[in-house]
Amino acid sequence: MRKTVVENLIKNAADIICRAKHVTAFTGAGISVESGIPPFRGPGGLWSKYDPGYLMIDYFLGNPLKSWELIRELFYENFGRAKPNLAHIALAKMEERGLLKTVITQNIDYLHQLAGSKNVCEYHGTYRYLRCVQCGYRLTAEETHLENLPPKCPECGGVLKPDFVFFGEMIPEDAGRQGLIEAEKADVFLVIGSTGEVMPAAQIPHQAFMNGCKIIEINIQPSNFTNVITHIFLRGKASEVMRKLARYLEIEL
């Protein structure tokens, strides 16, 4: 009986997506866990093992070497081995089919792009690029060497910083603007793997809901969205639910 109920919910979600004019995906750490990237918060999360204070922008600016030692271990030694999973691939296929307009991701892991998604709003930036804190020069992480820390800007010699949002930094203006635009345009938000705890990102689905948007949520457990704005809650791992959803959308993975 339970299996039938779940299948009906997934079918209903697929029907809503097919009828929609503008579907936006909103993804959080949960979509990348199956790619081997642990979440930052919660039991077993990175902040239960490491001090997040090293990623405070004021600490970084005053102690770039100490920050970079942790940054290199967490992001450049671990994230670099991660590959897109079936959930990332399914979203890319949906975009290819015209069923999905945009992915807004809280993640900095670049896995949506590696899966083939083209229109991605990286709300918190990306680890794939570095930016000079002095002159603003931007380059890929592959273009510099992380053996000698902190890495220095090839243009001015200033310290390079990963181009993602540190604690105490503002959301990039372009990303913040695009999030609000999507919340206005979308008639369906597909929320995947987000706990709804991180602000201001978590405000985006709420704003979409207030604008009359249908919220379809995929999570392994209820989130801060589930009993507040979610219309259809599909409980399970992102890859498993997206595989079933893709079948109803007639998308081959």
Image (tube, rainbow, N blue to C red):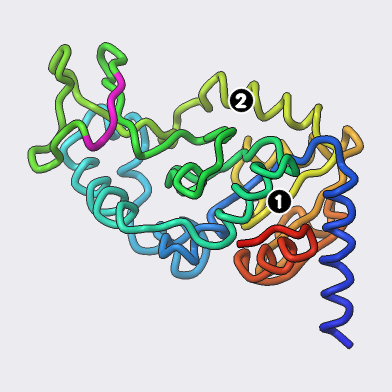
Badge 1 element: strand
Quarter-of-image position of residue 211: top right
Packing grade of label 1 (10 A; few <14, some 14-19, many >=20) is: many
User: How dense is the environment of label 2, judged by Cα within 10 Å: few (below 14), some, or many (20 and up)?
Assistant: some
The disc label shown at residue 176, or none: 2
- What is the x, y in percent for residue 198? 59, 45
Lower position in the chain sequence, tag 2 or tag 1: 2
Please name the residue shown 18% across and 42% down the image: 66
**What residue lies at 86% left-to-right and 65% top-to-bottom?**
11
Q: Is residue 180 above or below residue 194?
A: above
**Which residue is at 63% across, 35% downward?**
200
Q: Which residues are magenta?
A: 138-142
The amino acid pointed to by label 2 is: Gly
Q: Is residue 147 above or below residue 37?
A: above
Instruction: Residue at 37% x, 30% y: name it.
Output: 163
Residue 151, how many percent across, how many down? 15, 31
What is the quadrant of the C terminus in the image? Answer: bottom right
Q: Which residue is mark 1?
A: 191
Residue 230 horizontal side relative to residue 135, left or right: right
Question: Looking at the magenta stretch, what is its main secondary structure?
Answer: strand
